[in-house]
Image (cartoon, rainbow, N blue to C red):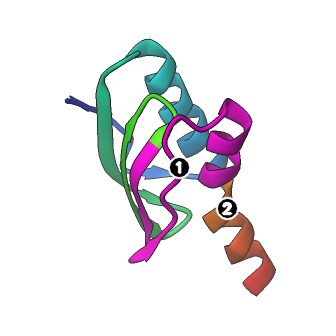
Amino acid sequence: MINIKFPELMDAEAFILAVDTARKQNKDKWVCGTVMVDGMWVEYKAYNTWIQIYRVEGVNYDGGMDALVREYKATLNQPFKDEENAA
């Protein structure tokens, strides 16, 4: 399993870019990490485009197996869109 080396704090755009880059660089391997994104704790574990664990402040946003890349990226964006809508 590959543990993504995140900086201490990230914004949503940088987080999504980092996990997508890790996905591309680690085909057919599990990747994971925990990081503070826009003031919220994020836990992430995925295999290619299958997001098995994706928790933002304790809320689950996991995705389906063998998702299309656009579905994968939509899942990554979802908690941050929810936060914008709540503000």
Image coordinates of residue 4 in percent, x first then y, are 32, 34
**In front: 28, or 59?**
28
Q: Is residue 19 above or below residue 12?
A: above
Which SS class for mark 1? loop
Question: Which residue is disc 2 drawn over?
Answer: 78
Q: Can residue 38 be seen at all in this image of the molecule?
A: yes
- Circle 1: residue type: Gly
- Circle 2: residue type: Gln
Question: Which residue is disc 1 drawn over?
Answer: 64
Q: Residue at x 52, y 23 (%)?
A: 21
In the rendered image, which quarter contains the C terminus? Answer: bottom right
Q: Is residue 68 above or below residue 24?
A: below
Q: Determine crowd level at label 1: few under 14, some 14-19, many 20+ residues with C-alpha closer than 10 A.
A: few
How many numbered circles are shown?
2
Image coordinates of residue 62 in percent, x first then y, are 48, 58
Which SS class for mark 2? helix
Please tell me which of labels 1 and 2 falls first in the chain: 1
Q: Which residues are magenta?
A: 51-76
